[in-house]
Structures are given as structure tokens and as C-alpha cells.
Image (spheres, helix red, strand yellow):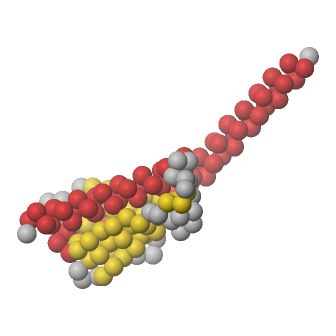
Amino acid sequence: MIIFIVFFVIVVFVLMTMVNYRKQMLKARNTYNEKMLPIEKKMLAHMKDRGKKIETVIRMITMNEDALIFVSDEEGAYASIGMSDSVIGFPYSDVVDVAIDNPMDGKEMKFLAVDLDLKNQGKLRYVFSDKPFKPKTYVGGIVKKYADDFYSKLLEIKNGNKANE
């Protein structure tokens, strides 16, 4: 009888965990869509107004549930970065420097940001997390990957500029 009760409790616990996980995933998807769609419209208009194509798209979300989209036209050597409140565009040749700022404190990352220095627009900082988090967790790993991909793409643009000089 005790084994049956323990088994029943475990099954109920697993079912509750699955339902809670599904609710969290649906909430995350809805948040993602609510934040991304308006930015995508702004980005499309921005690139179209400048006669640029969209060849690369990187959609990102931060630990604060802010959306960030990077698009680029490799042939036209032009990129654009959009957030809910702004869209900036720049020719690849404007990229002066790029850095990722992610200091560790044991197993936690204190914060996570990507810094971009542009000739005509100065230094810009894109914060992926402004509070400590563990990059080995599911959500922490996703946000860290977004920041790494964004940084890598910007570094590729910067290094391509140096090769062309």
C-alpha cells in the first residue's frame, strides 16, 4: 500500500511539473511574439527605406524579456539592430570595435552585455542580463548563446573591415 501511495505521489508530481513547464513555455512564446513582431516591422521598414536586403537575421531575447533583432545585408555591407524603442543602422565600415562583457563570479555570471563602437554613433551597449545568473541553466544558456552569436557576427563584420583595408 505504501508503495502505491509513493508511486501515486510521484506520478502527480511529474504531471504537475509537466503542466507547469508547458505553461512557462507558452508564456515565453507569447512574450517572444509580442516583443518581436513590432521590432521586425520596424527593421523591415528601416532596411527597405535604405534599399537593403535582409540576408541574415538573429532574433534574441534577454533575461529581462527584452527583444533584440540583428539583421544584415552582406552584399550591401549594411547592418541594423532593433529593440523595442529604437532601430539603428550602420555600414559595416563604421564598426570600430566590439566586445563582450561577461565577468564570472564562481558559477554565476555577474551580468552579460555586448559593446559595439561605431564611427558615427559612438559606443552602444546591448545588455542581455543586468543581474547575476547561471549560464549552465536552461534559460541562462539560451541567453548566453544569443549574446555569443550576436558578438560573433559583429566581430566577423569588424574583422572583415580590417581585411578590406
Q: Residue furthest right?
A: 1
Residue 79 on image: x %, y %: 25, 66
Q: Please give left or right for residue 150 compared with residue 13 in the image.
A: left
**Quadrant location of residue 126?**
bottom left
Image: 127 above or below 54: below
Image quadrant for the N terminus? Answer: top right
Q: Nearer the viewer, residue 49 or 165?
A: 165
Q: Residue at x 26, y 62 (%)?
A: 155
In the image, residue 115 sits, relative to residue 142, either above or below, namely: below
Q: Residue furthest top?
A: 1
Place of residue 25 in the rendered image (x, y in percent of width and height, measured from the top left): 59, 46
Residue 16 in sight = yes
Q: Residue at x 40, y 73 (%)?
A: 125
Q: Position of residue 151 (x, y in %)?
A: 33, 61
Snapshot quadrant of residue 12: top right
Residue 135 locus on image (x, y percent): 51, 52
Single out the residue that lies furthest toward the left: 165
Quadrant of image for the C terminus: bottom left
Task: From the viewer's side, name the closer residue of 69 and 37.
Answer: 69
In the image, taking residue 162 as reference, residue 145 lies left or right, namely right
All told, the count of numbered labels is 0
Identify the residue shown where x is 8% and y is 65%: 164
